[in-house]
Amino acid sequence: MAKTIENLEIEYQLAPTKKQKPNPNELGFGRIFTDHMFMMDYTEGIGWHDPRILPYQPITLDPSAKVLHYGQTVFEGLKAYLSQDDKILLFRPEKNMQRMNRSNDRMCIPPIDEKFALEALKSLLRVEKDWIPKAEGTSLYIRPFIISTEPFLGISPSISYHFMITLSPVGAYYKEGINPVKIAVEGEFVRAVKGGTGDAKTGGNYAASLKAQIAAKNRGYSEVLWLDGREKKYIEEVGSMNVFFKIGGEVVTPALNGSILDGITRNSIIELLKYWNVPVVERQISLEEVIQAYNDGKLEEAFGTGTAAVISPIGEFAWEGKKMIINDGKTGDLSKKLYDTLTGIQTGELPDPFGWRVVVD
Amino acid sequence: MAKTIENLEIEYQLAPTKKQKPNPNELGFGRIFTDHMFMMDYTEGIGWHDPRILPYQPITLDPSAKVLHYGQTVFEGLKAYLSQDDKILLFRPEKNMQRMNRSNDRMCIPPIDEKFALEALKSLLRVEKDWIPKAEGTSLYIRPFIISTEPFLGISPSISYHFMITLSPVGAYYKEGINPVKIAVEGEFVRAVKGGTGDAKTGGNYAASLKAQIAAKNRGYSEVLWLDGREKKYIEEVGSMNVFFKIGGEVVTPALNGSILDGITRNSIIELLKYWNVPVVERQISLEEVIQAYNDGKLEEAFGTGTAAVISPIGEFAWEGKKMIINDGKTGDLSKKLYDTLTGIQTGELPDPFGWRVVVD
Ligand SMILES: Cc1ncc(COP(=O)(O)O)c(C=O)c1O
Ligand SMILES: Cc1ncc(COP(=O)(O)O)c(C=O)c1O
């Protein structure tokens, strides 16, 4: 099904004027976009075609475009960093393209050519290199996504799509050093269930999560801890991050069971822990078990993992009017070491024994 | 939260030229749209504003508009009919606006003023009256929908939206008389789960259903029968319709449990059956129970219900390599009577003892 588009040439339509770069100290997340974006189209019977780099600009869609009605869409998220010696660095970007194709498969979207998509991203980054912020903790967030465009209200996969990549300079996630968050265990709403779309990076999962997220924020919590949709017993994810627990010296994270996302940070942490000979296991883990470990004084650390924060230490879990304070509400040693090592590898400040970095020449 | 917009005047920007009307015998579903659409915008701090009827045309969205990434969107579906005496008829349209607001609540979209939205629809229908097809079984399909437009990649509810209504003339669902379909029981994929978004009419539910639907079509079935996401044991819906079974003289349909849609056709059928003194019950019903009834010779009829088909008789269910043929694969008497009565009420050919019809003057 995937068309070979190796021979396709990317067309460059460069912006006649450039935007002013934002103040590097005032970068937030995902509100500022660079001068250009990448775009290509899919047409049934032709495949992906017309790859182009063009000025960042509004797109036009028919009011009946499928994405607006039936949510047939997938996305990815990764970051580019500028190294001390001025090179553009990516972190395991091939994994994002692979995951996008797994999401595509679940959502009945035609596959992309992963190699070509990565080349397209590199081409865009070369054009936008000036936009990669340099300050500690900052980076250029990359958003590849696919939307279904067929103007047809029947419930069926679209026969036409746009694949796009946009770029957004983002500020340091932790402005005053890495800082633990408070998490509310979600007892009512469900993000995903086995057989559903939880392991695909698709819009509906995120729309489904909004209501619980807002309720938690209103109660003073940063995010929710999602339990499984079947029994509301097993731990799945925290906000839109994977979650890890350090219990009695062993690190535990929920196994990939079909309803959680196969996070690239998660995978990297597992590999890093193995490399360090820290015991790590992927398995089903219940909330009850975590509470028991806490009561037994064995719950040493907990943290979320994802591209945005890399590591997000968890200082508190609240459930049914009860709460547990983890590691005195402070960032644990392992969380800190993982954060420092991963960000060090990502930004080029540390050696990369795994070959995870990709330099954009 | 809902703003009173009773005093808002709808602005008319009429199309300078009209499209040619399609051949009434070649109407399909959802591919042809009328000359105009309705649109209004939501801005945080202002509410809904700028209601307007304008030519049907592409809309522009920022590439980072939330609907394209996080699926924050809701929609509705209903139909307008032209009566013998040339009046525009709607069927319980206030129920669609109420349901849209329930979907809005689940998806963290600001509520619409239901009365105003219905007035907007009526205004649009007055402009597009010529587009309502007259032939038996045809109608004008109405698609109200809301999309989130804020250009921000953070996962949070949008602060801006478009509410739109488009219209599409649709052909007779049954060209050669009402005809039973074959349904595959879905054993792997799940459409929705309690705590999720199954009772909201939102894009992600439909995107999630595509893969199972295609697999069923490839095996020669029209649609899938969805089982509950927790135990894969209880019957939920069929395709994007509610489902009814007639077992030993009693009509049974799954209760509204949070993961199925509160169908307006479903509700009307329940009321109609009660009016006719046919026993009808809303309760949890397992696949096993239906199979048992079939084996006992008590499964008399099965049918799906929804705006598109009104009643869709089911002639066959297939599961795990087995199958049951219902009523010899023919349309049952009750299915037929419900279809004739409901469509008769909708088109104005039968009396309307329930006051369900709304005439657009
Ligand atoms: C639902 C969800 N879980 C987990 C993750 C973490 O994945 P990754 O480490 O690849 O960023 C993400 C994305 O960031 C996500 O959206
Ligand atoms: C998932 C789903 N179930 C059931 C229905 C039937 O609802 P209604 O009778 O209001 O059209 C629909 C919509 O048509 C639907 O999308």
Image: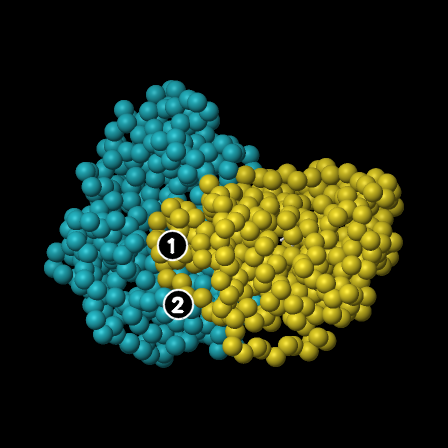
Chain colours: A yellow, B cyan
Q: Please, which chain is the residue tagged with disc 1 on?
A: A
- At x 38%, y 46%, the residue is A45
Q: Nearer the viewer, residue B259 or A66?
A: A66
Side of B287 relative to A251 (left or right): left
In percent of width and height, residue B236 lies at 45, 39
Query: Can you identify the residue that label 2 sits on?
Result: B59
Q: Can residue A98 be seen in this view?
A: yes
Q: Name the amino acid, label 2.
A: Ile
Lateral position of residue A77 relative to residue B244, left or right = right
From the image, tell me which residue sits under label 1.
A150
Residue A240's quadrant in the figure? bottom right
Q: In this view, does A230 lie to the left or right of A326?
A: left
- Mark 2 surroundings: few (<14), some (14-19) or many (≥20) residues within 10 A: few
Residue at position x 64%, y 63% from top?
A141
B293 in relation to A99, above or below: above
Q: Position of residue B315 (x, y in %)?
A: 31, 30
* Residue in the foreground of this view, choosing between B77 and A10: A10
What is the distance, in whole Å, between disc 2 and disc 1 at their CAs? 14 Å
Quarter of the image that includes the C terminus of chain A? bottom right
Numbered marks: total: 2
In the image, are marks 2 and 1 on the same chain? Answer: no
Q: Quadrant of residue B80?
A: bottom left
Q: Which residue is drawn at 78% across and 55% down?
A: A345
Amino acid type, callout 1? Glu
Secondary element type, mark 1: loop
Tell me, yes or no, whether the two marked residues, 2 and 1, touch with CB atoms within 8 Å: no
Percent across and percent down for residue A249 are 87, 42
Residue that sits furthest to the top in the current view: B296
